[in-house]
Amino acid sequence: GQVFVLDCRYDIKMTADDVDPWTFKWMHFNAVGYQEYPNMINGSTLSVVQMLDASQLEQMFDRVEACIMNNPSNTDLELYILLNGILDEILAGHRKVSRGAAKTRSRELIEQAQQFIKQNYRERLSNKAIANAMYLSEYHFIRQFKKYTSMTPYEYLLMHRLNLARQMLIERRDLSVAQVAGEVGFPRADSLTRYFTVKWGITPTEFRAMAAEGQAGGRQ
């Protein structure tokens, strides 16, 4: 599935061994006017493209061979069209793989940011602080994070804190609301109460009371 695009005006040496032999089709043509293709791929005289699906490209190579073998006297126009098609297919494959790799890197970065938030939720974090931890600009990071999670990094942090608080209100009845707030990263109890009420429509105290009633009913 790999394609090598070489600019043969320069010396290039490629080798393979018996341990990892190559099976390949080779095409060398006078590419006046095509010098920009290697540069369009990666700016090098040797470009390696990993094709997701090389079947279409293989068929085009076969058509070039058939064109030369079966009709050698009248092939210029047809070859020109085929060669353009081959180079365009390689360029399209490169762009497709590049976009896929970029998406994978972005997704991995977002997952790292989520892990960072979960490990440091007690700290005083902001969008900018989280972006700095990921070594990205705040604007770019927020845009990428929201693309994959539908929320900003700070909104994700708040949601994580609120979910922890709700769990702790049920399981740690020995802690006051203010202590729960401190445990999950809110500086004051009123901060927890404000965000908690906006999210679920009741205060932490009301939620704890309702949860206790539900548990008591379940034990009877």
Image: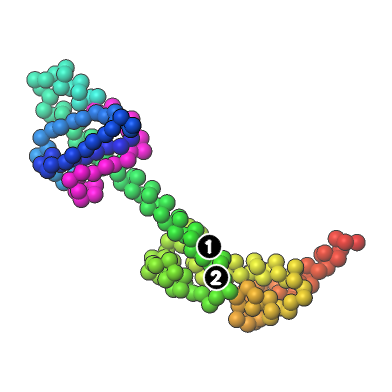
Could you give the CA–CA distance between mark 2 and mark 1, rounded to whole angstroms? 9 Å
Earlier residue among tags 2 and 1: 1
Q: Residue at x 69, y 79 (%)?
A: 179
Query: Where does label 1 land, which residue?
Result: 115
The furthest residue to the top: 70
In the image, taking residue 171 as reference, residue 6 lies left or right, namely: left
Q: Amino acid at mark 2?
A: Asn
Q: Residue 152, how many percent across, how many down?
A: 49, 67
Q: Secondary structure at mark 2?
A: helix
What's the coloring here?
A: rainbow
Left or right of 174, for residue 109: left
Q: Secondary structure at mark 1?
A: helix
Q: Quadrant of the C terminus?
A: bottom right
Q: Is residue 102 magenta?
A: no
Q: Quick one: label 2, few (<14), some, or many (20+) residues within 10 Å?
A: some
Residue 60 magenta: yes
Q: Magenta stretch: give its range.
A: 38-61
Name the residue tied to disc 2: 120
Q: Residue drawn 73% across and 79% down?
A: 176
Is 69 left or right of 106, judged from the image as shown? left
Q: Using a 10 Å C-alpha cutoff, classify the residue at mark 1 as few (fewer than 14 neighbours), some (14 to 19) or many (20 or more).
A: few
